[in-house]
Amino acid sequence: MKTLHIRNHKLGRLMPRWGTPAGLVATAARNLGYTITKDNNLVWAGEPINTIEAHTSAGVNLYTNCTIDDVPNGKSLFLGMSGPLPGYFTVDKLGVWPWIEPTYKQIDLDLVDLDNYPHELINSIKEQKKTLFHSKIINKGHDSPEPEDLPDDHILILVSHMDNQWKDGWAMFGNVVSRLKWGDMDYPVVIKFDPRLTHGHDGMPDKHKQEQHKPMMDSLKGIKGVTIYTGAESLHDILPKTRACIMDECTQFLEPFMYEVPIITYSAPPYHRAVKKVEHQHELIPALHDISWYSKDLSNRWLTWYLTSYVCYDQESTTRRVKELLDVV
């Protein structure tokens, strides 16, 4: 008997945000001949009927919000939240953003048909100024506050989650800012922080987070030619004036692709083969002055692949993705 077993390794309760996509994955697997089981006492909103409780499973395990490094050996899939809008999610063999298969395996972008570029979806997102954030307090759309004193033709640095087990993200960010500050730079710099650095998951300001990051943000405000945004200012207002964007495994990575802004990364995010990757600090300033390395074609191919072949958002897209994965796990 082929089974897909839903684990409570990271989340003991699958509330709608996680339960709904888990249900789509389970339905896809069941339609492919799999029996659906789950850990004993796992609370699962949207649980499909006839799901069987079991202590363990010799089949394929579905984990939420973790990576292959976090779980025992065995056949596994990983459910993560990533995509252009709330309700989008990923299913992967290795983990969740940024520890997903495209980070480690090169995608043949020459095979991507640009006739499938999702014009309608992207135009709708841009027109409504929408983002991936679930909280309407920080995903305000047209009600987003105007980014005050936004300079033209600036270099944008996007700051998201800063630390992981492989590197000190804050130190890397500091090196980038120092290089821009002391280098021969002709362009103003804009730093846009992920609002969740100073806000809770509900979108409300978090006093502890604000106090934690205040010294660093205050020090940046004193640098001439640097403009900082820490709140709900929209990237849809900032990117049309951006010359180039610097980011690492930033969760708000899709918007620069949508606005066809040249992207530089100093890390190894899943899109690193479609952008300019700098290995050493001295490469940064020349790459910003001369952006002839930018390939609009390559950038659009990656975005097309990601939005039409990788992320899931409904039963059809989930079934396509799950079938692809279950054929190889």
Image (cartoon, helix red, strand yellow):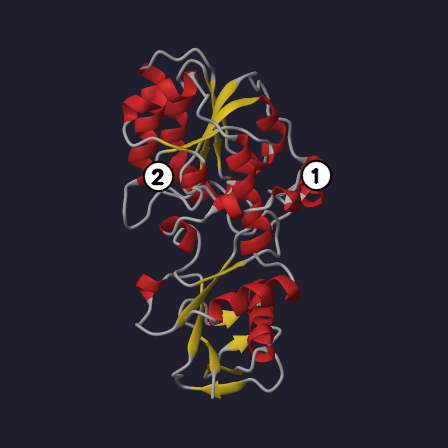
Secondary element type, mark 2: loop
Residue at (46, 79) in percent of width and height: 5
- Please say if 77 is above or below 153: below
Residue at (52, 36) in percent of width and height: 299
Badge 2 amino acid: Ser
The local crowd at label 1, few if under 14, some if 14 to 19, many if 20 or more residues have their Cα within 10 Å, is few
Q: Are marks 1 and 2 in contact (CB under 8 Å)?
A: no
In this orientation, does residue 100 appear? no
Judging by the rendered image, the residue that carries numbered circle 2 is 267
Q: Quadrant of the C terminus?
A: bottom left
- Can you tell which mark lies on residue 252? none
- Residue closer to the observer: 175 or 289: 289
Secondary element type, mark 1: helix
How many numbered discs, if any?
2
Badge 1 amino acid: Asn
Residue 204 placement, left or right of 286: right
Residue 79 percent coordinates (x, y):
48, 63
- Residue closer to the observer: 196 or 187: 187
- Label 1 vs label 2: CA separation? 29 Å
Residue 4 placement, left or right of 113: left
Residue 39 percent coordinates (x, y):
45, 81
Residue 23 percent coordinates (x, y):
59, 72
- Residue closer to the observer: 276 or 169: 276
- Residue 293, quarter of picture: top left
Whichever of labels 1 and 2 marks the residue nearer the N terminus, that label is 1
In this orientation, does residue 63 appear? yes
Judging by the rendered image, the residue that carries numbered circle 1 is 123
- Residue 268, quarter of picture: top left
- Please say if 18 is above or below 298: below
Residue at (45, 14) in percent of width and height: 225
